Image (spheres, helix red, strand yellow):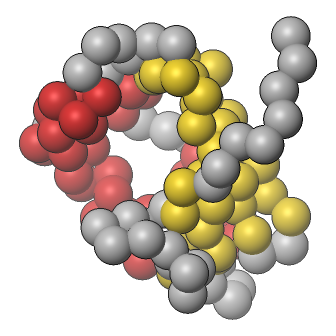
Amino acid sequence: MRRFGQTILLKPGKADEYVRLHAETWPGVLAKIKECNIANYSIFRKDNMLFAYFEYTGTDFTGDMDRMAADPETQRWWDVVKPLMEPLETHGRGEFWADMTEIFHVD
């Protein structure tokens, strides 16, 4: 199992819409997340900053993420939610959500 932390910003005035959409996340999107070996997925908000945490339980992260990205319903969901966000200036090449480095963990 591999843990991920990611962060991104919400555009000004878009927080309420983002929260509303995630209160009613489409069932097909939720199913695809699980199908692609993502578990314990949470998104937290502070002002206009989002922090996501999830655990990857599969063996081919790139393949699973490619499969998720190719899913038509997931693509439609991203078309709705992506315009509400803006990447951090320091995000890496190819990242939308910026990956964070885990510096501490205890079970």
**Residue 65 relative to residue 39: left or right:** left
- Between 63 and 29, the one nearer to me in the picture: 63
x, y percent for residue 28: 31, 27
Q: Residue at x 33, y 52 (%)?
A: 77
- Between 40 and 61, the one nearer to me in the picture: 61
Q: Is residue 82 visible?
A: no
Q: Residue at x 76, y 75 (%)?
A: 48
Work out which residue is located at the far front of the displayed protein and give it: 103
- Between 58 and 13, the one nearer to me in the picture: 58
Name which quarter of the figure residue 66 lies in. top left
x, y percent for residue 27: 39, 26
Quadrant of the image containing the C terminus: top right
Name which quarter of the figure residue 15 lies in. bottom right
- When the figure is inspected, residue 19 is found, relative to residue 47, above or below; the finding is above
x, y percent for residue 45: 79, 58
Q: How many marks?
A: 0
- When the figure is inspected, residue 14 is found, relative to residue 6, above or below; the finding is below
Q: Is residue 9 visible?
A: yes
- When the figure is inspected, residue 34 is found, relative to residue 9, above or below; the finding is above
x, y percent for residue 92: 43, 71
Q: Residue at x 78, y 43 (%)?
A: 103
Q: Residue at x 42, y 77 (%)?
A: 83
Name which quarter of the figure residue 70 lies in. top left
- When the figure is inspected, residue 23 is found, relative to residue 57, above or below; the finding is below
